[in-house]
Amino acid sequence: MAPEARPIVSRRERPAKPALTREGIVTAAVGMMQAEGLERVTMRRLAQELDTGAASLYVYVRNTAELHAAMLEELLSQVDLSMVTAEGDWQERLIRVLWSYTRILFEQPGLAQSALVTRPSGPAYFSLAEAILALLSAGQVAPDRAAWAVDLLLHFATSTAAEQGTRKRAIDAGDEEDALVAALLGAPADTYPHITALGMQLMSGAGPDRLTWGFSVLINGILQTPRPEPGATPGG
């Protein structure tokens, strides 16, 4: 018996691919990152995911750095900014906004590392910066200090998320911590008197306590420290 002939499907009858857009590219990249990690998000793999050529992506995204910035911008829309208009102490509200930002990056340490050198410039980032400035204004922080404080506070949050998030996911993170503890406890007192005096206090407060304390230190320092005069010699 002759084999059954396969029906011929015209290309015109195949479903059309969704139009390629910058928003669609970024959404696909974020989904891939959340499933596999940022290191797996390459232009080639992203193009395969979108059933197109890598060259087509560069029409909408100039390079990987711009893609990472756009991905961060999309995630920043999840930051809780409701504290700006809430009641209560302005410093506590500012710390809660910064915590919301940090918590998002904790889940994506690769993107946090990228954010140290690349920042978005879209509405979500501007809304976050505006929220920080509004709360600093509520605390009567001098405008010139507030202008620098935004970068300082976000840099501390970002670098903490990059460090802690990466360490948390490392396979040998537990072994490294155990080795550090053993080294601290075994440090000779005559050579390292301050280290041995503090001992495990150096390792205490891991997690929310240290980060919250760090935000408080920075905010209090911003309140008390004027910006240097232009051209002032460091330490002079």
Image (cartoon, helix red, strand yellow):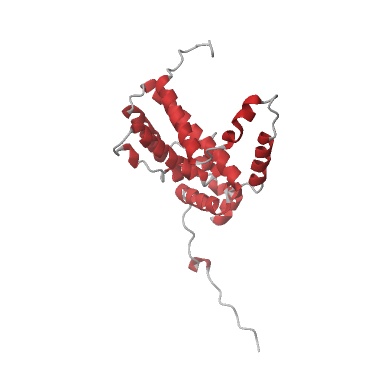
* Visible residue check, residue 65: no
Q: Quadrant of the N terminus?
A: bottom right
Observer-nearest of 28 and 13: 28
> Which residue sits at x=40%, y=39%?
96
- Where residue 206 appears, x then y in whole percent? 54, 40
Observer-nearest of 65 and 125: 125
Outermost residue to the bottom: 1
Observer-nearest of 120 and 224: 224
* Horizontal arrangement in the rendering, residue 223 relative to residue 181 (left or right): left
Observer-nearest of 27 and 125: 125
- Where residue 104 appears, x then y in whole percent? 47, 45
- Where residue 86 appears, x then y in whole percent? 30, 39
> Which residue sits at x=59%, y=43%?
166
In the figure, residue 190 lies in which quadrant?
top right
* Horizontal arrangement in the rendering, residue 89 relative to residue 209 (left or right): left
* Horizontal arrangement in the rendering, residue 89 relative to residue 193 (left or right): left
